[in-house]
Every structure is written in C-alpha cells, then in structure tokens.
Amino acid sequence: MKVLPRNPARKRKITLAILVTSTVCLIAACVALFVFQVRTFKRDFKNDLSAFSKVVAQISAESVAFKDNGGAEEALKSLGAKTDVVSGSILTKDGTPLAHFGDPDDAAIQQKYPPNKGSILFQGYLLHSEPIWEPPSEERSVLDGERIGTLHVRSNYSTVFESRLKQYAGILALALIVCLLLAAVVLTGLKVETQIKKLQQEISDRERAESQLEEAHTQLVETSRHAGMAEVATGVLHNVGNVLNSVNVSANLVSDRVRGSKADNLLKVGALLREHADHLESFFANDPRGKLLLDYLPNLGAHLHEERSDMLQEIELLTKNLDHIKEIVAMQQSYASVAGALEPVAIASLADDALQINAAALNRHGVEVIRNYADVPLIMVDKHKVIQILVNLIRNAKYAMEEFGRGHKQLVIGIETTAEGCVRVTVKDNGQGILPENLVRIFSHGFTTKKDGHGFGLHTSALAASEMQGSLSAHSDGLGTGAIFTLELPQAPT
C-alpha cells in the first residue's frame, strides 16, 4: 500500500491532483452517459410513438373502412392518453381528411408528414405517419389487406427532450456539486489537519517554552535565595567581625596587662624574704632593702588589685562579646534552615533581626535607625523570605544614603496595619531617591543602578512577597528626596 508523504504541502498537492483527475473522469463519464441517453431517448421516443400510433391505426381501421367520421374521431381520442401528442388526423386513401384530434395542423406541417410509414423531426415536433390497413376477414389476413388510409400523429418532441435534458443536466450538476463538495471537504480536512498539526506544534513549543521558563524561574528563585542568604550571611559576618575586633582589643589589653604585670616582683620579694628568713626582724629594722620592702609591699598589693580589676573587666567584656557572637550565629542558623513553610511570626522580631544583621554596616556609616512599631497581629509568612526581603531593603537604603553623601543618615522602619487587614512594613531612607522613570522598572529582573549590582534582589523580593500573598512597592519624589519601600503581608488567621 502506497503511503502519502508526510510533508503537508506535498500531500495537499497530490490529493488535489487526485481530486482534479477524478473530477475530470467523472465529468467525462457524465458527458458520455448524457450523449448515450440523448441518443437512446430519441430512438425510444420514436419507437414508443410508432407502437402507439400502430395501435390507434388498428382501432380506427373499421371506421376508415366505412368512412365513419364519428368512429374515427372516437378512435383518435385515444391519442390523448399520451401527453406529448399534440394532434392527430386520419386521411382516406385518396388523402381526404376523415377525422382530426387536438391542434389543427397547418399546411406546412401537413406537407412534412412522411407519405408512408415513418417519422421525421420538424420544428421541434416528431411527425409520424402510420398506414391504416383494411380490417382482416375470414377470407384475408392483415398482411393481405389493402391500405385504406393514413394516420398522422404529431408529438411535442422538443418539450419532452428539454425536460429530459434538464433532468440529465440536473444530475450532472448534482454530480459536479458533489465532487466539488467532496473536494472542498477533503481540502478543508487537509487544511484542518495541517492547522491541527501546526497548533499541536505550537502547543508543544509553548509547553516546552513554559517548561524552560519554569525551570529558569526555579533556578532564578534558587539563585536569588542563595544570594539573599549570602546577603544575610554577609551581614552576620560584618557583625561578627565588629565583635571580633572588640574581642581582639580586649584580648590584647589582657595580654599587655599580663606581660606588664608586677606579679613577677612577688617572686623577687619572696626570694629576698626566704634569704633573710632567720633574721626577718633585723632585716626589716637594719637592712635598707627591708625598710623599702615595707613601703613596697602595700603599693604592690594595691597595684595587683587594680590589675586584677582591670583584667576582670576586660574578661567580662570579652565574655559578653563572645556571647554576642553566639547570639549572631544562632540567629543566622535559625534563618539558614529549610525554607518554604508558612508560620505565624511577629513582624517586629523579623525587622529587629534584619536590623541586627545589618547593624555593623549601619554603625560603620553612622546611620541613625528609628523604629516606629505599632502593635500589630502576627503574620502568616515564610520567615526566611521575609528576613531576606528586609535585609535587602535595609542594605539598599544604606547604599542609597552612602552614595548620596548626606551627613545625617536616617533610616526609619515603620510597622502598622492597613484597612485591608494586612500588616505593612515601611523602610524609609533619606538617600539619593529614585528617578520617576525607574519606579516602573525597579522590580524588573536585571535592572540595577549600582555599579556592582546583579539586578535581581528587588525582583526576587517582589516575587517572594507575591508568593506569600503580599506585595512590595516603592515610592520616591525624585532625586535627593529619599525613598520608601512598602512591604504588605497577610495577617495570620485567628
């Protein structure tokens, strides 16, 4: 079995060629059938009229033999049984009209009738002449009888032929219409098949593109999450670094105090006392060193007591700094666990943690932090995402104020509820602000105004807020006016 090619265009061409060839063959067959039917119709029409005329001639033979006008007319009335017969007449042997039926024949028509038996077409009529023979008797048969008259019958051949022609033309037209409809259906089917394949291809391409987009989105979210965690870790390292500086200072002070301590002089005092252990009274009374030792020992005790107090103070400060490091690391560990779970949390606690993570950088650049916290309900969020958003917003605010070069840098963190039942967190700075044309682009992936920016911090933060059924927006009146970033998050169900 021959298989059509898979190429849709080539398949359409082959199918169209098959349809055209089939249609031409069908039309040729219809034309041949039409010609055959026309010829057959003409022959059958003559034969039918001849047979019918012979019957009428036999019926009218008695009347013609006796020249009975009434009987002949009655016999001619039987011509009315054939609807296509227009007229008929009976002539005697010498050509005298004996009876007539239907429309009168004019002289031109009468002259065209065949003189003997036969048929002829004239002006759309079929003119037939049928001889009338003498009726048979006991002495003679019909074959032996004498011709006593002629029956002329005029039939409307053209009307019947046109009717039959219309019938044949209708059949041919119907066949052509069926062929055209069939061709249209087939071609439409091919087009539909092509469109279906095209749509299937488009759907496949779109599904593949969506899959790739989803994969890219997943990778972006994961990369952004790692970047956010890196920012949190960077803040933690800054804080730990600052505390370690204090630890290092305290350790150096303790070390210097130990190296410069007067405790070694106690060994000398002890050795001197052991040397004069047998005559200590004489040593303190008469030996100049003994007299000096009496003044030196109280001063040494006071000095050692002062050293001890200073070192205890430094060790206490060192212990506090080490505890601070432990707290910072513990906070980082709490946010480094697996993210994704929604839980009710206090937004103020998250905001404080975000500020604590950025505390080293904020203190280093002299940023004044103002907390405007209202009493708000718990929020139902992924705390890892929220802390990353807030750390990113606070760090961006610090960069904005640093680049603008303002002497008094101020960062205001606000927490309040909204009329829609959400909790709103605002991060306001008095830094360089945002250009109006950048407000609509600031959350787009890849957009950044920093020289070393990657352009997906705010984009990822906005996506994270949206995933928690919240929102992140920005407002600024222009350059030099600072900026306000607003994070709205849903309340935890009560």
Image (spheres, rainbow, N blue to C red):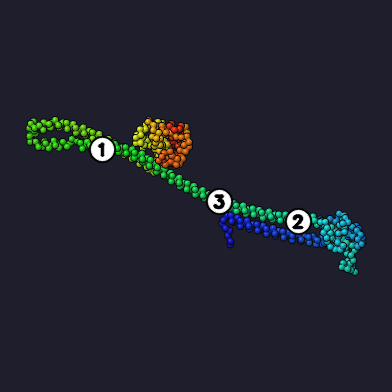
Instruction: Give amino acid for label 2.
Output: Leu
Give the residue at mark 2.
165
* Residue 87 in view here: yes
* Residue 284 in view here: no
User: Where 205 sits versus 57, above or below?
Assistant: above
Give the residue at mark 1.
251
Instruction: Give amino acid for label 1.
Output: Ala
CB contact under 8 Å: marks 2 and 1: no
Secondary structure at numbered mark 3 = helix
Image spot of residue 293 (x, y percent):
12, 32
User: Where 72 sits versus 220, above or below?
Assistant: below
How packed mark 2 is, by other alpha carbons closer than 10 Å (few <14, some 14-19, many 20 or more), is: some
How packed mark 3 is, by other alpha carbons closer than 10 Å (few <14, some 14-19, many 20 or more), is: few
Secondary structure at numbered mark 2 = helix
Task: Say which label, 3 or 2, has the lower sequence index.
Answer: 2
Gap between marks 3 and 2 measured at Cα: 48 Å
Residue at figure coordinates x 87%, y 67% from the top left: 142
Gap between marks 2 and 1 measured at Cα: 123 Å
* Tag nearer the camera, 3 or 2: 3
Image spot of residue 295 (x, y percent):
14, 30
| 77 on left or right of 15 | right
Residue at figure coordinates x 46%, y 35% from the top left: 435
The quadrant holding residue 303 is: top left
* Tag nearer the camera, 2 or 1: 1
Task: Say which label, 2 or 1, has the lower sequence index.
Answer: 2
| Along the viewing direction, whichever of 164 and 435 lies nearer the viewer | 435
Residue at figure coordinates x 8%, y 30% from the top left: 285
Give the residue at mark 3.
198
Task: Say which label, 1 or 3, has the lower sequence index.
Answer: 3
Q: How many marks?
A: 3
Instruction: Give amino acid for label 3.
Output: Lys
How packed mark 1 is, by other alpha carbons closer than 10 Å (few <14, some 14-19, many 20 or more), is: some
